Image (tube, rainbow, N blue to C red):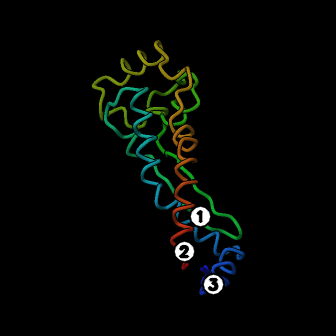
Amino acid sequence: MAFEWDTTGFYRNINFFKKEEGWQEVLAMAAGNIEDEIRDEAETLLYNQVNRVTGSVGDSIETTVDISDDDVTFSIGSTHPAAAMIEYGGPVPADNPKKPFSNVDDYADNIYAFSNAIKKNQPFKVPQPFLRPALENGLSKLNSEINKVAYEFLDL
């Protein structure tokens, strides 16, 4: 009785994984595979904590995967003016109501009554993170996806 190990393609695979570019490709593909899932989780976390009024905060959440030099960067963020207040907390500014709420006209008949109620209640005073937890929760998914993608590159 004998066992044989076929090493066809073995050295090619080792060389692929020894190269930095090989790992960058694996990491970028893995991050790209799960970026929509992490974005959706951020939106779910957001609306579990704050009321969905127009949905514009959730719609503004974006993820990117970028390869530059020797780094692969996965990022999640939002350009919505309220996103930072929700994520990090803090008082709503008392000056121009249109500054922190650029889209207030979309859902308030009287922007001054609306902004006065917001300033009085200060609903964003306490941090209600949704981007950072979604990214942190996605790390285990990313690790699993890295393994899955790496095995796809193997040709054993």
Q: Check disc 3 and report the residue beneath it.
A: 7
**Dot placed on the residue nearer the N-terminal end, 3 or 2:** 3
In the picture, residue 127 is in which quadrant?
Answer: top right
Horizontally, is 96 left or right of 72 in the view? left
Which label was assigned to residue 153? 2
Amino acid on which the number 2 mark rests in the picture: Phe
The percent position of residue 101, horizontal first and vertical second, equals 43, 32
Q: What residue is shown at x 59% (from left), y 30% (from top)?
A: 88
- Report the Cα–Cα distance between label 3 and label 2: 15 Å
Instruction: Report helix, strand or loop for mark 1.
Output: helix
In the displayed structure, would residue 88 be above or below residue 134?
A: above
Q: Check disc 1 and report the residue beneath it.
A: 27
**Dot placed on the residue nearer the N-terminal end, 3 or 1:** 3
Horizontally, is 55 left or right of 101 in the view? left
Instruction: Report helix, strand or loop for mark 3.
Output: loop
Q: What residue is shown at x 50% (from left), y 35% (from top)?
A: 130
In the picture, residue 46 is in which quadrant?
Answer: top left
**Dot placed on the residue nearer the N-terminal end, 1 or 2:** 1
Name the mark nearer the viewer: 1 or 2. 2
Q: Residues within 10 Å of mark 1 (few under 14, many from 20)?
A: many
